[in-house]
Image: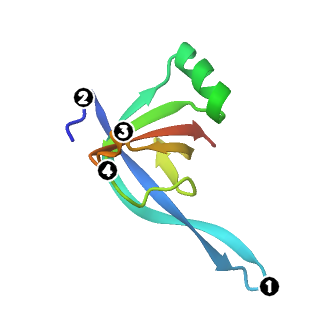
Amino acid sequence: MTIIGPTVQIVIQKKTSTSDGMGGWKDVYSTRYTVYVGFHSLTAQERLVANREAGVITNRIFMDYYSDISLSDQITYGGNTYQIISVVDPAQAHEHLELDIGLIK
């Protein structure tokens, strides 16, 4: 896929549960992929429409297709962490993905 517009490097992190040593579990994120993507801020109107349907979406990512990206993954970019809110494979063509994401911190 050729990304139109500026690209940035992001890190996609996979969530795994590990023992906390006291009989419980804690979630830990580790790097799954480091990739270049199109990273776009939504306009005020796009946010209004998107947030009615899915939650607090702040940005949209356009990236090459990966079959194992999931909603439990998270993204880090520019010192911020983002939750993946939706993963869309347009026309189910397995060519690229569109991720709607929301700022966590």
Residues under labels 2 and 1: Cα distance? Answer: 49 Å
Q: Quadrant of the C terminus?
A: top right
Query: What amino acid type should be assigned to the residue bearing mark 2?
Result: Ile
Q: Which residue is mark 3?
A: 90
Viewer-closest of 9 and 68: 68
Mark 1 highlights which residue? 22
**Residue 83 drawn above or below residue 16:** above
User: What residue is drawn where x is 64% and y is 78%?
Assistant: 18
Camera-side mark, 3 or 1: 3
Q: Name the residue nearer the viewer: 30 or 59.
A: 59
Q: Residue at x 50, y 31 (%)?
A: 59
Q: Nearer the viewer, mark 2 or mark 1?
A: 2
SS for callout 2? loop
Observer-side mark, 3 or 4, equals: 3
Residue of label 4: 65
Check disc 2: other Cα within 10 Å, few if <14, some if 14-19, many if 20+. few
Q: Is 75 left, or right, of 1 in this rendering?
A: right
Q: CA distance from mark 3 to mark 1?
A: 44 Å
Amino acid type, residue under disc 1 in the picture: Met
How far from the left and from the top, in percent, is residue 64?
29, 47
